[in-house]
Image (tube, helix red, strand yellow):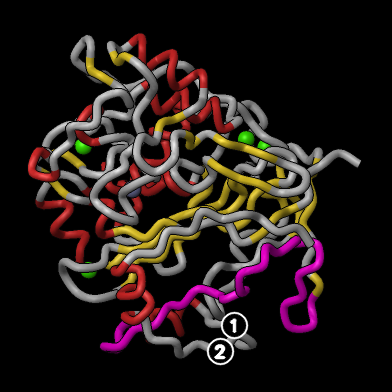
Amino acid sequence: MKNLTRTRRHSLWMAAVLGAIAFTSCSDETITQDDANAILETETSSLSLVDHGDKMIMLDDLIVGDDLLTARATTAAGNDRGRFNITLNFLLPPTERQEQVFNDAAARWERIIIKDVPSITGTIPSAFEGFPPASEGTLDDVVIEVALAPIDGPGGILGQAGPRFVRTSDYLTISGIMFFDVDDLAFLESLGLFEDVIVHEMGHVLGIGTLWNISTPDFERNLLLGGTTNPYFGGRKANVFWNAEGGTGELPIESMFGPGTAFGHWQESTLNNELMTGFLNLGENPLSRITAGSMKDLGYGAASVGESYDLPRGTPGVNLSTLEEAGAAEGLNIAAMEELLMPIGFINTDKK
Ligand SMILES: [Ca+2]
Ligand SMILES: [Ca+2]
Ligand SMILES: [Ca+2]
Ligand SMILES: [Ca+2]
Ligand SMILES: [Zn+2]
């Protein structure tokens, strides 16, 4: 069993998230889609994440009920060997609009991460108590379980997102979750930010702010550098584009606005309306080639392309620390409403 040094961020509202979700499902009972719908129609709906404790799981060894689950890298072609594919697994039937927004969000990432990765054959358990597996058979290339359910009504908690299982070969996401409060979606839609929020959260599932730093006996990744006062992104590709866009010094990572925002996003005061800052601006929030470069630094086969993004020439990087809270752009403090989840385990994808 390997232990991953996790940079888990604790935040006040994380406790609120946990407190808000009732724990009622039984781990040894599988809930059908109809059952799930019935549960969600009651006032105290309940979706809870399977608790595996703090130890990282090696999926080869995971026993669920009487079943020993195994999942391995495979040479099976999968659906599409020519490109990187994000599969969305909706736990509950989405509305047409929700499905469209999630599909559009996945498509935005698939324009940036383009290279196929080895498919996985086997059973990947659901991250949620009592639900069918996240994936069975051959998975090409990443599966995201999407749960849209009531959490705490409008405002407050938006939800949780992050990876669940990562590959041992590259420590990148195989499975992840996006769990959102349905009661907040109309508000996001009214701001014109529904799709941007989903793309943003999908970025966390794929590793932004969640897989930057990993330390195991077999693998080290240290992309978040600079300590707590002047954090910056250490990846070379992202920095090439940061400089090409007009930034000076190192690509700055957010250090302010508390846990949940700090150390998991680009710095708001400098990167402004870039999508992976902690605040979503009203209007456009492009996914720039700076972020595309950071996906390459993580290890993805990413294209050096980004959506149209304008960073003023000479925008200072980590050397400047004059950020004031009041200077935050008008918009949605997405990071204060989300909980980033860290991976819970590995699937062995090393060549034998
Ligand atoms: Ca593929
Ligand atoms: Ca594949
Ligand atoms: Ca809410
Ligand atoms: Ca922003
Ligand atoms: Zn975020």
- Residue in the image at 86% along x and 39% along y: 351
Residue 222, x across and y down, in percent: 57, 36
Quarter residue 199 falls in: top left
Image quarter where the C terminus lies is: top right
Quadrant assignment for the N terminus:
bottom right
Q: Position of residue 182 (x, y in %)?
A: 26, 67
* Residue 271 visible to the viewer: yes
Q: Is mark 1 within 8 Å of ligand 2?
A: no
| Residue 297 in which image quadrant | top right
Q: Nearer the viewer, residue 339 or 49?
A: 339
- Crowd rating for badge 1 (residues with CA inside 10 Å; few <14, some 14–19, many 20+): some
Q: The disc labelled 2 sits on which kind of residue?
A: Cys
* Nearest the eye: 36 or 289: 289
Name the residue carrying label 2.
26
In front: label 1 or label 2: 2
Amino acid type at mark 1? Thr
The magenta region covers 40-67
Q: Residue at x 10, y 52 (%)?
A: 190
> Which secondary structure dominates the residues rendered in magenta?
loop
The residue positioned farthest toward the right in the image shown = 352
In this rendered view, identify the residue nearer to me: 141 or 242. Answer: 242
| Mark 2 Cα shell of 10 Å, populated few (<14), some (14-19), many (≥20) | few
Residue 42 is inside the magenta segment? yes
Instruction: Tell me the CA gap for discs 1 and 2.
Output: 8 Å
Q: Residue at x 74, y 37 (%)?
A: 77
Q: Which mark is residue 68?
A: none
Q: Which mark is residue 30?
A: 1
Mark 2 residue element: loop
Disc 1, SS: loop
Asked if the beta carbon under badge 2 is closer than 8 A to the nearest atom of ligand 3, the reply is no
Residue 83 inside the magenta-drawn segment: no
Q: Is residue 273 visible?
A: no
